[in-house]
Amino acid sequence: MLLSRAITLIESTKKEHQELAQDIIEGCLPHSGNSVRIGITGVPGVGKSTFIEAFGNYVIEEENRTLAVLAVDPSSSKTRGSILGDKTRMETLSNHPRAYIRPTPTSGSLGGVARSTRETITLCEAAGFDTILIETVGVGQSETAVHSMVDFFLLLMLAGAGDELQGIKRGIMEMADSIVINKADSGNEDAAKRAMAEYKNALHLFPPTESGWIPKVATCSAFHNKGIPEVWEIIDEFVRHTKSKGFFEQKRREQASYWLDESINQELHRAFYDNPELKKRLEITRKQVQNKEVSSFTAAKKLIRLFFRNTP
Amino acid sequence: MLLSRAITLIESTKKEHQELAQDIIEGCLPHSGNSVRIGITGVPGVGKSTFIEAFGNYVIEEENRTLAVLAVDPSSSKTRGSILGDKTRMETLSNHPRAYIRPTPTSGSLGGVARSTRETITLCEAAGFDTILIETVGVGQSETAVHSMVDFFLLLMLAGAGDELQGIKRGIMEMADSIVINKADSGNEDAAKRAMAEYKNALHLFPPTESGWIPKVATCSAFHNKGIPEVWEIIDEFVRHTKSKGFFEQKRREQASYWLDESINQELHRAFYDNPELKKRLEITRKQVQNKEVSSFTAAKKLIRLFFRNTP
């Protein structure tokens, strides 16, 4: 498949591949953008893959959409296994002609993975996919990156406010455009409803979003295929709400601008932190700063001077 | 006063002042750290200055502390007037021999103000102050900076979940180690109690902090001097809790490390964004990126190449 080969180029670290990939992306850019980009996060065990399978089949079959599923999870291959790597969990979806599933790249920094995912979105959109799902595990740094590249951010949760929260990073709840409580089945329905009421109250106490959207809470059972249309309805309502006031496009423009600065930062960062002499020096300096031998500001100034002296 | 003059040096943009200031800071560093650093935020109108006056007098008189009050609010002088600039609102405190109030610097970027505030903390601690209050208005970028330089972060709120939330930035609630509902007086007591219960429920749904501390909610009336000892008790409990497990010191070390990287970032950032040729080019590039004429990554690469060619 052409799309897969283009994405492989994007993910490649070889220089000649990267140059070709950039040409392809520039060619695709004018044809990109015509989609809904949805981020999905939640701790392992919340049922993300089952949800994506149910949700994906629904939007393809009932809403006549085409779906690309991507993942941002730099560490997954080593530590807990990428959900998307295990395509067998999404059997129907992965064999569907109008779905495309792309596992997370098996290596690379978060910055690198975020970049290639953003570029993969461009490619998928140019290839005609109008619904992009980006999955991430809600335990690391990657949610902020995913949040900054999607239109809508969905947090999957389980009923009860106990153990399943342990893994969720603080700050994620306030990013969510919707919280959906999964596994509302097998006698767990009441607990899910109680959780829904609790989260509704909690979100009500949060400051409103810029667009005036109030994050919605819902329950579903992905396994039993219940509550899935309602989740799509929330997303659809969100898109209509934000488009009607111009927030949808505004956010995308802000995101493009954000990623320009972010890419500049990453490049500056890499130039500095990958410099072997600085690396050694930084390690020593960090200990001195932590031991109150030197102030962080003075230390930084010295390192920066050294950096510009050593950079071609 | 010697302390004030040293802080003025820190805030100065003159090169010879900065060099002298750095010498002073290096000299003070080994004698710093023996304090509780408390961040206070809340929208204008929540009663921060009244709270600081009441709280400050309490900890000095009843808990035998010495108090330095600083502010991080780069924009205050222009837009809404620094609370601390108006010392008349803290009459008792500002005349107290064991209190020191330093208004926010009247100009400068957030990065600059954050740096000088951090260095001012060092100076105040070396001068013997054991309680440092850092005030910020909860509507901008400065809360993250303040959160990263304090041990304990206090969010002041008003009763009712309506209008007073409009100004609070999303994400701040999850930073708070305690939410205190002020103005629980003049017939507002019941509303404050209801708000307290609601926030308790909401915080209960948040993921736990690393140290296991569960953010506490309380009410007070700073104006009527009610509930102030209870706020100090929360802070004291927090300090005992985090110190007993080593989290207190660990957080400080992480913060020192964070500010080293942050200072490096700021210096790199400044070198790039203050470059006049790049400034012009960046403006054009940003529009191109937003108009989907070029990808953010390719654009950033080109700008970075230009940067390193132009940097001495």
Image: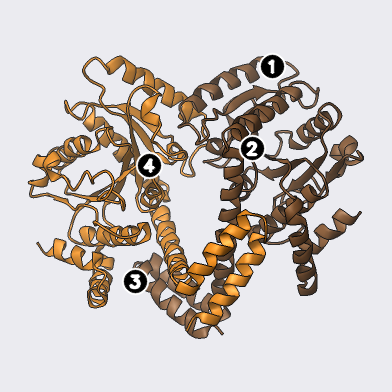
Chain colours: A orange, B brown
Q: Chain of mark 3?
A: B
Are circles 3 and 1 on residues that touch, CB within 8 Å? no
Residue A196, image quadrant? top left
Q: Which residue is mark 2?
A: B152
Are circles 3 and 4 on residues that touch, CB within 8 Å? no
Q: Secondary structure at mark 3?
A: loop
Distance between the alpha carbons at the discs numbered 3 and 2? 46 Å
Taking the spot 42% from the left edge, 47% from the top edge, the residue there is: A245
Instruction: Check if mark 3 and mark 1 are on a common chain.
Output: yes
The amino acid sitting under disc 2 is: Phe
Q: Secondary structure at mark 1?
A: helix
- The quarter of the image holding the N terminus of chain A is bottom left
Instruction: Check if mark 4 and mark 2 are on a common chain.
Output: no
Q: Which residue is mark 4?
A: A139
Q: Position of residue B233 (x, y in %)?
A: 70, 25
Residue A36's place in the image compared with A90, above or below, is below
Mark seen at residue B189: 1
Q: Secondary structure at mark 4?
A: loop
The amino acid sitting under disc 1 is: Glu
